[in-house]
């Protein structure tokens, strides 16, 4: 093995020290894939230094549901995680997910029914982290597959990747908390842009800043809007995917909080299948505001695109109880809208961001 990029150690230390603050005796479950070996070795070393237990669970896809198994197993098994994996989800003290795909379209050929069952099983494993019962962080390790999605050679993608992640998170946190305070004081938020005019209520809800703790890269603040409040239409121009299938040009129309009309230029069947997953899938679980200026263009990777400064994202499905959310669903799908050209955010009728620039 050649020399390891020194940024790998910095990245691992950020995950262990800031994102999780690993404590002695913890069992830290690491979900990952083989290409992430350089950072996994650093994570194991650093967690061991803190007198804790690194528990590495590696799949070619992502634990707890392996794609090769899910494509062949009886459907009723695909929707349930193995008892030993349920035990792990119930007893881990912290979790790190490091995605390092060699193929970003791995499950695209699988039936929508099987993909829905996989998501249902994974939701069980992620229950405690969605409820914020334990520290957790989700992130990536740069691979050729991710670089290809972003339209970059690997070295350029690595520079972008670490530039977005290895930031002065204390300074970023201070800036985002200042903006969050204005949103916390508001009753309503309105998103206006291309084919978009959508309002929702934040009354009685407070948001939270992601400053390098639950995701890397961080760089957003987010809310769970009042469940029955969304009204209007939004067009999402940033491409996304669902279960590895591309979905673009999503248009959603909300009435009394619920998606009543939905269409997509590409992947409409995937969109409708997601929204029909369960009773909660057609409601907004999250409104997020992107603030990471190290991300300047869509990378065809939602974890990055949703943090891009000048964007907002809406997640349909499960909300976050820690910020007052009450919507329950096996779905939590973040979809990004770019407001940097002709978009704005209003709070209680006041324009607070226009064309991606803050006015407060």
Image (cartoon, rainbow, N blue to C red):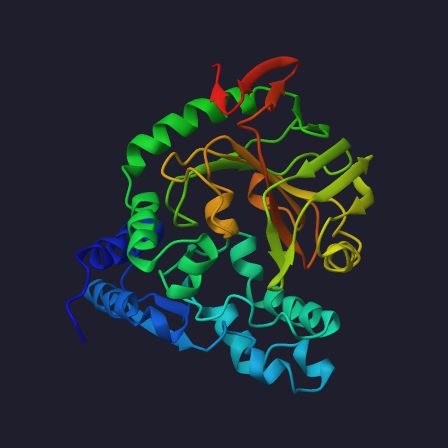
| Observer-nearest of 192 and 116 | 192
Judged left or right of residue 263, residue 308 is: left
**Is residue 277 visible from the viewing direction of this image?**
no
Assign the N terminus to one quadrant of the image. Answer: bottom left
Q: How many marks?
A: 0
**Is residue 46 visible from the viewing direction of this image?**
yes
Where 329 sits versus 351, above or below? below
Q: Residue at x 29, y 34 (%)?
A: 170
Where 38 sits versus 59, above or below? above
Judged left or right of residue 197, residue 288 is: left
Residue 298, percent from left and from top: 49, 44
Q: Residue at x 66, y 21 (%)?
A: 187
Q: Quadrant of residue 119?
A: bottom right
Q: Quadrant of residue 174?
A: top left
Residue situated furthest top in the rendering: 350
Q: Residue at x 31, y 38 (%)?
A: 169
Residue 176, percent from left and from top: 42, 29
Where 317 sits versus 345, above or below? below
Residue 132, percent from left and from top: 51, 51
Residue 299, percent from left and from top: 47, 49
Q: Quadrant of residue 4?
A: bottom left
Q: Residue at x 52, y 81 (%)?
A: 84
Judged left or right of residue 336, residue 41 is: left
Judged left or right of residue 117, residue 9 is: left
């Amino acid at each position: 093995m050649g020399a390891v990029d020194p940024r790998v150690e910095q990245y691992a230390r950020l995950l262990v020290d800031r994102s999780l603050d690993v404590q002695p005796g913890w069992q830290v479950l690491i979900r990952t894939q083989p290409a992430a070996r350089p950072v996994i070795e650093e994570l194991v070393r650093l967690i061991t230094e803190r007198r804790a237990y690194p528990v590495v669970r590696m799949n070619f896809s992502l634990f707890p549901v392996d794609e090769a198994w899910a494509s062949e197993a009886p459907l009723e098994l695909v929707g349930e995680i193995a008892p030993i994996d349920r035990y792990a989800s119930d007893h881990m003290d912290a979790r790190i997910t490091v995605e390092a795909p060699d193929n970003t379209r791995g499950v695209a050929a699988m039936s929508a029914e099987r993909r829905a069952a996989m998501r249902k099983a994974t939701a069980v494993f992620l229950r405690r982290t969605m409820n914020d019962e334990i520290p957790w962080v989700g992130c990536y390790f740069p691979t050729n597959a991710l670089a290809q999605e972003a339209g970059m050679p690997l070295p350029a993608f690595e520079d972008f990747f670490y530039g977005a992640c290895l930031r002065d998170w204390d300074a970023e946190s201070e800036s985002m908390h200042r903006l969050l305070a204005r949103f916390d004081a508001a009753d309503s938020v309105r998103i206006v842009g291309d084919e978009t005019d959508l309002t929702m209520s934040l009354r009685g809800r407070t948001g939270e800043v992601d400053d390098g703790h639950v995701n890397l890269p961080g760089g957003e603040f987010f809310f769970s809007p009042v469940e029955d409040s969304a009204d209007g239409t939004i067009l999402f121009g940033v491409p996304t995917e669902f279960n590895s299938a591309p979905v673009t040009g999503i248009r959603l129309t909300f009435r009394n909080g619920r998606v009543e009309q939905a269409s997509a230029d590409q992947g409409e069947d995937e969109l409708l299948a997601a929204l029909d997953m369960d009773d909660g899938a057609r409601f907004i679980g999250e409104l997020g505001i992107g603030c990471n200026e190290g991300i300047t263009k869509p990378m065809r990777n939602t974890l990055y695109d949703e943090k891009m400064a000048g964007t907002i994202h809406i997640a349909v499905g499960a909300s976050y109880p820690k910020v007052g959310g009450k919507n329950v669903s096996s779905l939590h799908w973040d979809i990004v809208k770019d407001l940097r050209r002709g978009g704005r955010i209003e709070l209680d009728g006041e324009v607070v961001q226009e064309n991606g620039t803050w006015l407060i």
